[in-house]
Amino acid sequence: MKCAPLPPLEDARLETLRRLDVLDTGPEVRFDRVTALTRDVLKVPIALVSLVDHDRQWFKSRQGLEATETPRDVAFCAHAILRPEPLVVPDAREDPRFFDNPLVTGPPHIRFYAGCPLLVRGYPVGTLCAIDLEPRLLSQSDLKMLCSLASIVSDELERGDGAWVDATTGLLNERGFLEHADGALRRASRRGQRVSLLRLEVSASAAGLDVVELLPRLGAIVEATLAEADVVARLAGGSFALLFVGDGCESMTTVEEALERRIVDLGARLSTQVGRASCYPRGAGQLAVTSLLEVAGANLVPVLSAHPEVVCGLELGDCAASAPPAE
């Protein structure tokens, strides 16, 4: 039996997995639906969401298998995370990596395996895999379906659990924003893309008015921008953040104007301020995201005023505001 070597950047991969806070948690419908669909569509007896930890693979969702984990050194999925494309093993008994694997020679007697990596912020944290107890081939259409279902699982892992979601508005909370924005900045850095942040602060302008009572409606207004903004969140109180990446930055002014109109249409006596910050990130990290938020927060102006966009330099998590560009 050949044990899988460690993938590149293994420490960073493991840290990404652990920051998901999903290991050793209970079953969740959002993952169980995907594994049930995988089993039905591919007509296999076993389907798993497998997360590859330091010394084990642990199953966040499983169909057709009683075990909740196996040692990493016998895991097919430990091999699957080494490559960007799916790993397909038509007959494990004829594969030199697996023919004497205890999962092949003993229960559950794996013959066929197909696993697609689950990418979270660029790191393969595990796989969505389909297992059969008989040798078989996988059609291109079935392989494409497996990859599509794996993308759904990756998206759900990125989104996080309730700890990342604001219960009042259904948007990401500050923790969720930091995680998702960090990933967005890293991708933008690799691609040389511009990143822009719009910070929205809504407060009561009259005594006796409680912004908290309006948060569900404010959340719905902000959520309507998801088609243009890459990451949207409620940070705290009446504070919201919208992150735009690449071509999406061009729509920020339009989104801002739409938000202002819809908030005015609420008819409540609210005070609304907005702040902007923009950069071409070089390197990233949650400190960089926090710095971008702070720069936008330090340059808040009332709505319907001129909106200077502060240009930041982000490198290794640092953000320094330059003077606003000349009109």
Image: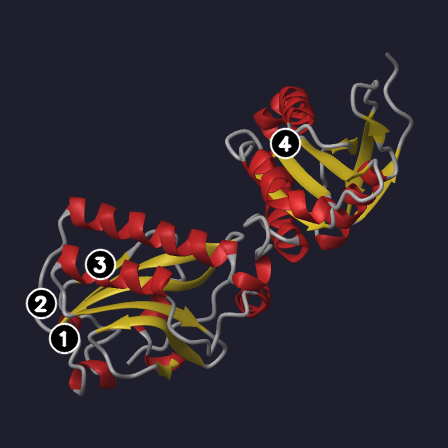
Q: Residue at x 26, y 73 (%)?
A: 97
Residue 223 is situated, as x and y percent measured from the top left of the image, at 55, 38
Mark whose residue sits in front, 1 or 3:
3
Instruction: Tell me the kind of residue under disc 1.
Output: Arg
Image quadrant in which the N terminus is located = bottom left
The earlier-in-sequence mark between 1 and 2 is 1
Mark whose residue sits in front, 1 or 2:
2
Residue to which mark 2 is pinned: 135
Residue to which mark 4 is pinned: 193
**Mark 1 vs 2: CB contact within 8 A:** yes
The numbered mark at residue 93 is 1
Q: Alpha-carbon distance for marks 3 and 2?
A: 18 Å
The numbered mark at residue 38 is 3
The earlier-in-sequence mark between 1 and 3 is 3
Residues 19 and 75: in front is 19
Q: Residue at x 63, y 31 (%)?
A: 193
Q: Quadrant of residue 301?
A: top right
Q: Alpha-carbon distance for marks 4 and 1?
A: 47 Å
Instruction: Tell me the kind of residue under disc 3.
Output: Thr
Q: Alpha-carbon distance for marks 1 and 2?
A: 9 Å
Mark whose residue sits in front, 4 or 2:
4
